[in-house]
Image (cartoon, rainbow, N blue to C red):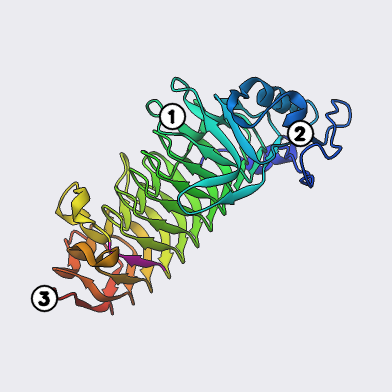
Amino acid sequence: MDKHGFSRRGFLAAGTVMAGTAVIPAAAGSGFAPSEKTGGMLNVLDFGAKGDGRTDDTSALQKALDTAGKTYGSVFIPEGNFLTSELKVPAGVGIHGLPAWSYRDGMGTILTLNDDKTKCLINLTNSFGAYLFGLCLKGKNLGTEIHGILIDKPDYGKQEDTPRIDTCRIERFTGDGIKLERIWCFVVRHSHCYGNKGCGLRVRGWDGFILDNWFSGNGKAGYASYDENASNTITGNRIEWNREGGIVIYGGSHYNITGNYIDRSGRCGIALLKGPSRGCEVISATGNVIYRSGKPEWGKGDDYDSSHVRIEGGKGIAFVANSLNAGRDDGGQGSYSPDYGMVLKELESSVIKDNVAHNGALKELLTDLGGHGEGVIIRDNVGTLRKIS
């Protein structure tokens, strides 16, 4: 039994996880004919999809996915602009596109939302072992609380979800770019969540690898876990210009947060806060660069949201060897921030040590609000306040 009260390895032994893998064909119509008997890579053009930016391709795309689902095959979507409503991905199916994007716009294989009443563009609920590669998803700010990619389960179930979201761009949705609700084992890597009104990536669940992504310009946090969450690895991401924070975790445990670049957050660069039943526990954060947090023009919840790091009610926290620096907008515009470097409160069995805050904050580099339990080391954190002439 693991910490969540069930044996995941037992389910693996039952052979319940399936994954769709295939080689991407060189071009559309290159001889990969659909076959319900043999499976393999299916081309959506063979199912009537147009990709011309005018035709509603929902029916053709869903038919290709459903056909692939019969054999745990894969679907190829070539370059083009495919207008679509919500697509439901069957278990064990891969969707392969041709990835291309600039910082501000998606190109290559584009799926554009054309339904302002749906809840998402790609629905991965119960899509065990699904794989998304090389897709640009455009939300066009349609509707209200519409997510780019969604898993929405009523409970955790008895099987690992194991979706892999790889080299995708998810932009301008009115909800979260990616929302994983009661997720259990997942990978998000090499992807870009840009300009969504919610979070770039929001996770309720555990056992995830979040690697080498951009979470940029989202209306809430770059990465956020507001509900139960644990055992996620967040490594090598660029998390920038998100209005309500860079990495925001409530009551999470067993995280590794390593080597991320967190820039110009509207609130804290990293916030490890109390959830409904407990604070954060057993989290290691090291080697992160946190710059220009607490952008004042975007407002804040309270004074201490203008900080690079805020850790309250944590146990077993190691925050070591991170670099903090105050600044303002590009081109010397806007106000300098944050006011505070690190804000600490009610820690236990934790080490906050060897962090560097060169020109790190405007008012105070380390704000210790006390209330700590046993085994807390706070020392050797060096730096200077930024002086504004």
| Residue 71 location (% of width, % of height) | 80, 29
* Whole-number angstrom distance, CA of label 2 to CA of label 1: 27 Å
Question: Residue type at mark 3?
Answer: Ser
| Residue 186 location (% of width, % of height) | 58, 45
Picture quarter with the C terminus? bottom left
| Residue 247 location (% of width, % of height) | 37, 53
| Image: magenta residue range | 288-292
Q: Is residue 88 left or right of residue 264?
A: right
Q: Nearer the viewer, mark 1 or mark 3?
A: 3
* N-term mark: 1 or 3: 1
Q: Nearer the viewer, residue 268 or 25?
A: 25
Give the label on residue 146, or none.
1
Residue 155 appearing in the image: no
* N-term mark: 2 or 1: 2
Give the label on residue 389, or none.
3
Give the label on residue 43, or none.
2
Question: Residue type at mark 2?
Answer: Asn
How crowded pointer 2 is (Cα within 10 Å; few <14, some 14-19, many 20+) is rated as: many
Per the picture, the main secondary structure of the magenta-coloured stretch is strand
